[in-house]
Image (spheres, grey):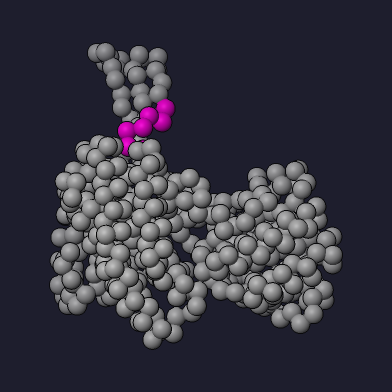
Amino acid sequence: MADTLHTPTEDLHETLLRMGEQARAASAALAKAGPAARTKAILAMADALVAADSDILEANARDLDGGKQKGLSSAMMDRLALDAERVAAIADALRAVADLPDPVGTEIARWTVPSGLDIARVRTPLGVIGIIYEARPNVTADAAALCIRSGNAAILRAGSESLHSSIAIASALREGLASVGLPEDAVQLVQTTDRAAVGHMLTGLNGNIDVIVPRGGKGLVARVQAEARVPVIGHLEGLCHTYVDGAADPQKAVDIVVNAKMRRTGICGATETLLIDQAIASDLLPAIASALTDAGCTIKGDAAAQALVANMEAATEEDWRTEYLDTIISVRVVDGVAGAMAHIEEYGTSHTECIITEDQATAETFLSEVDSGIVIHNASTQFADGGQFGMGAEIGIATGRIHARGPVGAEQLTIFKYLVRGTGQTRP
């Protein structure tokens, strides 16, 4: 893959148009290749990643140095950092994708109509998918593998913070594709820090990009949704909530809340706001707050929460709207499940919400009435992940209401067509 880090702005549009044409041709070849060939390709991509381990880590070291110079937060640096164990985990995620059923050609439904026509609805690739993401180099591999699994070509645009790592990863993936005779242009990375590249991709590159998937902060997603000339599978920020109900098991509540917030604070599935039922707050909130504080978390609360926990910072209106991606959590005492759902409806981003309760009826109310892509009962919001859902990996968590919602895996990167089989019918 040629190094175009310094492509002049005036040449960038032509470069991207050529990438679009190459991706379109590659997508056609990939869709025809068949499930076995696509599986072989993904496994070869995983092997190529492991073989390129030293190159990838060297590139990542350059990105980490750049991140320090830019003053990236500890959470962002954690997202960016790779080591041998993480590279191996990325390769294992690709192998998990290879083990997934190939969705292309899967029959979703089949029926016969009174005219005698036999009609089947089957899955087909979307075509060429443009994926725009920020400081997580593993997305380069995850997104590419899911696109190959679903018969799609990918044009990837990484954030400037992770560009060197992403280039090294993409180069290895392309080598893996070529080694099994599939077009390496099925995976292409835009190798420039020029923000104009995003604008060019959003035009669709003369019809060669079929769908855009943004994965990043609110600013990126807002720009993509406002400017895109092609359909968008939106991944809004993960302002996730955990609600501790009056019928919660105390130990479960402490364990789940601490894990949901502190396991990895920089991922989109991390809980950012804790809601707790006023019926149990005086008994349980101090214990939860103590466990969070011991784990290194700063707590900001409303007046009712502050009255129960000494030295708790005051939460502002802005805190209820903030995806911290850091060791900070906001806490509000609410009036039962209705109060929790009202808060989520006002401040949530339709990503992931959790209820902790032993009352099954209350749990079912929460599960059925909360309008988010993922709604969880008695488990950490950190499970909001395609790999944890058995999808091998994910491109993101879709928070919209069209086509895909929740973790976007290989199946969600397909559309369908109708196959109609007749025996000579003509319409009267």
Q: Is residue 418 left or right of residue 190?
A: right
Q: Is residue 85 left or right of residue 11?
A: right
For the residue pair 242 and 335, the one nearer the viewer reads as 242
Q: Is residue 108 magenta?
A: yes
Q: Is residue 283 magenta?
A: no
The image shows residue 58 at horizontal and vertical percentages of: 30, 73
Q: Is residue 27 above or below residue 305?
A: above
Quadrant, the N terminus: bottom left
The image shows residue 295 at horizontal and vertical percentages of: 65, 72
The image shows residue 349 at horizontal and vertical percentages of: 56, 61
Q: Is residue 319 visible?
A: no
Q: Residue at x 74, y 79 (%)?
A: 312
For the residue pair 425 and 101, the one nearer the viewer reads as 101
What residue range appears in magenta?
A: 103-109
Locate residue 136: give its quadrant.
Answer: bottom left
Q: Residue at x 73, y 58 (%)?
A: 253
Q: Residue at x 18, y 72 (%)?
A: 4
For the residue pair 99 and 30, the one nearer the viewer reads as 99
The image shows residue 198 at horizontal and vertical percentages of: 30, 68
Q: Is residue 107 left or right of residue 176?
A: right
Q: Residue at x 22, y 44 (%)?
A: 30
Q: How many marks?
A: 0
Quadrant, the C terminus: top left
Q: Is residue 34 above or below residue 232?
A: above
Locate residue 80: give its quadrant.
Answer: bottom left
Q: Is residue 424 visible?
A: yes
